[in-house]
């Protein structure tokens, strides 16, 4: 499988090199014509999700050059992103199949199942279930984390309510001295 991933990356790098060569032809001022190797490296870094800051630091390339390079080779970058997404899907599917096999092996071995901590089963189940619900668009659960202490607004409301309750239960007495 790793050989396949490397071969796919090499084919995308060749596509990037071809795209750079085509964009550099007849345009001596563009980076594609001046330094095609650096242009291909920058495109590969962009496709791999590297930040502009990292590309600038590594390749000594200014912002305008990176932006124009990205805009001229948008189709090639999109092709690489789609390949990365496909690779992630294939890896995820492979891991799913391995987990399924591991679950079956665990179910067939009661001694090993007894040694397995329930958290080691519950956490992956929760993650898988959540991902399933997200995938089918049914994950409507909202989890809210609250701290034990009341908010300032809640405390002020409670103080005002206590003052009002005290006022309502009291009798007004005139304490003005008479002369």
Image: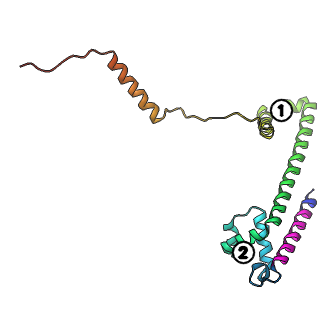
Give the image location of residue 169, x and y in percent: 33, 15
> Is 12 left, or right, of 74 in this rendering?
right
Nearer the camera: disc 2 or disc 1 = 2
Secondary structure beneath disc 1?
helix
Residue 9 magenta-highlighted: yes
Q: Quadrant of residue 37?
A: bottom right
Q: Quadrant of the C terminus?
A: top left
The answer to whether 177 is drawn above or below residue 157 in the figure is: above
Circle 1 packing at 10 Å, graded few (<14), some (14-19), many (20+), is: few
Q: Residue at x 57, y 34 (%)?
A: 146
Q: Which residue is mark 1?
A: 115
The quadrant holding residue 162 is top left
Q: Which residues are magenta?
A: 6-23
Drawn side of residue 146 relative to residue 117, left or right: left
Q: Few, some or many C-alpha atoms within 10 Å of disc 2 (few <14, some 14-19, many ≥20)?
A: few
Report the disc number at residue 72: none
Residue 146 on the magenta span: no
Q: Which residue is mark 2?
A: 59
Q: Is residue 28 above or below residue 5?
A: below
């Amino acid at each position: 499988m790793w050989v396949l991933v490397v071969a796919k990356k090499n084919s995308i790098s060749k596509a990037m090199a071809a795209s750079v060569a085509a964009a550099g032809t007849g345009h001596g001022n563009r980076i594609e014509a001046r330094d095609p190797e650096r242009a291909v490296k920058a495109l590969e870094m962009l496709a791999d999700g590297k930040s502009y800051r990292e590309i600038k630091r590594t390749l000594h390339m200014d912002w305008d050059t990176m932006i124009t390079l990205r805009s001229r080779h948008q189709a090639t970058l999109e092709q690489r992103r789609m390949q990365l997404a496909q690779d992630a899907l294939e890896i995820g599917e492979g891991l799913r199949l391995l987990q399924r096999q591991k679950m079956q092996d665990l179910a067939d071995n009661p001694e090993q199942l007894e040694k397995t901590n329930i958290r080691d089963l519950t956490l992956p189940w929760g993650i898988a279930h959540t991902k399933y619900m997200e995938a089918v668009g049914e994950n409507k659960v909202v989890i809210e984390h609250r701290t034990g202490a009341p908010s300032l607004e809640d405390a002020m409301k409670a103080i005002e309510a206590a003052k009002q309750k005290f006022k309502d239960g009291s009798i007004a007495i005139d304490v003005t001295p008479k002369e």
